[in-house]
Image (cartoon, grey):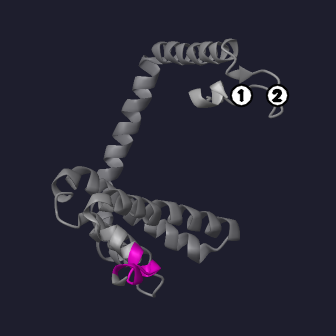
Amino acid sequence: MDLLGSAIPGDVGLRLLLTPICSNIVIRTACCTVGTVLPVYSTFKSLERNDQEERDKWLVYWAVHGTFSLVEVFSDKLISWIPFYYHMKFAFLIWLQLPSNNQGASHLYRRHIRPFLLKHQFKFDLMLNYTCGEIAKFLVVYETEIQCLKNLIIKGATTAHQMLKDFGLLSSQGSGGPNTLTRLTIQDSNDAEN
């Protein structure tokens, strides 16, 4: 009975996060939710309310989150082996969003990211201008091939659409409007016999 009595709801979440078998899946999902899903919704709300202060807060958050993601891409294979790395990442993502006067994202931006970008701004601008120029040249030189690829993709999509209609997986007239997927039902062999 003592084991059942200790499994209160607050305890369950902590045990789930710290259980070695489920921990990686649960904590990675939690990191994605806290680091991306909630900030996307909060950004949406600040845009809809036309709140400049909130917009600035979330813009700074996204600058820090993007910088962190960029660093993580290059170092993930090394640092993911650190015990409780994803737990630390989860705590870091929460710290970035804390609503106190000295938010983590604002702190990191003012102290580290902004000075770094100001120092290297000229180099980054040169790189971006050069890259944009090269992309423009590439698009001009290979315009015919790109158009051919575009036509090929459109033809493939049209053929796939027609095949779905021919196999009856797509109805041209339905309650959901034209070209809606029909429901597929798969009966269990026991259901079919009854």
Q: If the image is split into quadrants, where does the C terminus sit?
A: top right
Q: Is residue 6 magenta?
A: yes
113 or 15, which is in the foreground? 15
Q: In x, y percent, where is residue 116?
A: 28, 66
Q: Residues within 10 Å of mark 2 (few under 14, many from 20)?
A: few
Q: In x, y percent, where is residue 88?
A: 27, 70
Q: Residue at x 57, y 74 (%)?
A: 54
193 or 128, which is in the foreground? 193
2 or 1: tag closer to the N-terminus: 2
Query: Spatial distance from mark 2 to mark 1, Cα to Cα?
Result: 8 Å
Residue picked out by circle 1: 182
115 or 160, which is in the foreground? 160
Q: Residue at x 20, y 54 (%)?
A: 75
Image check: 9 left or right of 85?
Answer: right
132 or 149, which is in the foreground? 149
Q: In x, y percent, where is residue 22?
A: 32, 59
Residue picked out by circle 2: 174
Q: Which amino acid type is shown beneath numbered disc 2?
A: Gly
Residues at discs 2 and 1 in contact (Cβ within 8 Å): yes
Q: Secondary structure at mark 2?
A: loop
Q: Residue furthest front?
A: 194
Query: Quick check: can you spot residue 103?
Result: no
> Bounds of the magenta span?
3-12
